Image (spheres, helix red, strand yellow):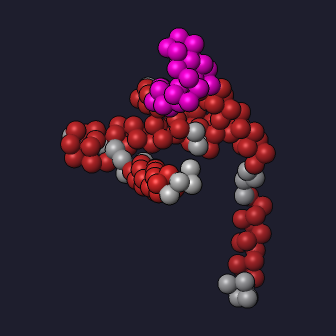
């Protein structure tokens, strides 16, 4: 495609297209994603400390309820339409943390709720998040298998 000679009309159109193309504020978008992602992580850390202080979890055991709480909060915010605004503002800063997973699950469920609970919500809820769940479960299985074999062989 790079070797193809463009006609004068194509060249003129390409120049016009480049002139009117909106410039994306990449640095600004990266900064917004970094800040919002950081705020989400600070909230997650505060929730972890909450579980440690009030429910006497250890740092290792507080992770699971913290993740569940963060996913629940993101699902609530998605249901009320707030997380969509956060996602529009922050982009990947709201999609990369675990809250993005909760958002993707509940968004699909909300979108297909008119088709019924079984075929609509149940059938479409995990379309986007299903691959993430599958990869997580399979990875956990492989890691557990390797650890079990290493333990049996006396390496660990």
Q: Nearer the viewer, residue 107 or 128?
A: 128
Q: Residue furthest top?
A: 54
Q: Residue at x 25, y 39 (%)?
A: 114
Name the quarter where the N terminus is drawn.
bottom right
Image quadrant assignment for residue 80:
top left
Q: Nearer the viewer, residue 53 or 42?
A: 53
**Image coordinates for residue 93, horizontal then vertical, percent:** 64, 39
Q: Is residue 47 magenta?
A: yes
Q: Is residue 70 above or below residue 50?
A: below
Image-based side of 64 in relation to 106, left or right: right
**Image coordinates for residue 50, horizontal then vertical, percent:** 56, 16
Image-based side of 50 in relation to 31, left or right: left
Q: Nearer the viewer, residue 89 or 77?
A: 77
The range drawn in magenta is: 45-70
**Image coordinates for residue 62, horizontal then vertical, percent:** 53, 25
Q: Is residue 59 magenta?
A: yes
Q: Residue at x 35, y 37 (%)?
A: 110
Q: Nearer the viewer, residue 55 or 93?
A: 55
Image quadrant assignment for residue 97:
top right
Number of numbered tags placed on the structure image: 0
Residue 7 in view? no
Q: Residue furthest front?
A: 154
Q: Residue at x 68, y 32 (%)?
A: 38
Residue 61 in view? yes
Q: Is residue 124 above or below residue 78?
A: below
**Image coordinates for residue 138, horizontal then vertical, percent:** 42, 55
**Dominant SS in magenta:** helix
Image-based side of 52 in relation to 38, left or right: left
Q: Is residue 6 above or below residue 112?
A: below
């Amino acid at each position: 495609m790079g070797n193809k000679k463009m006609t004068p009309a194509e060249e003129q159109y390409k120049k016009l297209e480049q002139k009117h193309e909106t410039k994306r504020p990449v640095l600004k978008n990266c900064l917004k994603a970094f800040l919002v992602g950081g705020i989400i992580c600070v909230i997650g850390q505060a929730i972890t400390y909450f579980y440690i202080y009030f429910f006497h979890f250890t740092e290792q055991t507080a992770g699971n309820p913290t993740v569940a709480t963060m996913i629940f909060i993101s699902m609530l915010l998605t249901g009320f339409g707030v997380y969509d605004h956060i996602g529009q503002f922050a982009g990947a800063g709201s999609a990369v943390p675990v809250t993005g997973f909760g958002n993707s699950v509940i968004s699909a469920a909300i979108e297909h709720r008119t088709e019924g609970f079984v075929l609509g919500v149940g059938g479409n809820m995990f379309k986007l998040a299903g691959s993430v769940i599958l990869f997580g479960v399979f990875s956990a299985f492989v890691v557990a298998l390797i650890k079990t074999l290493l333990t049996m062989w006396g390496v660990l």
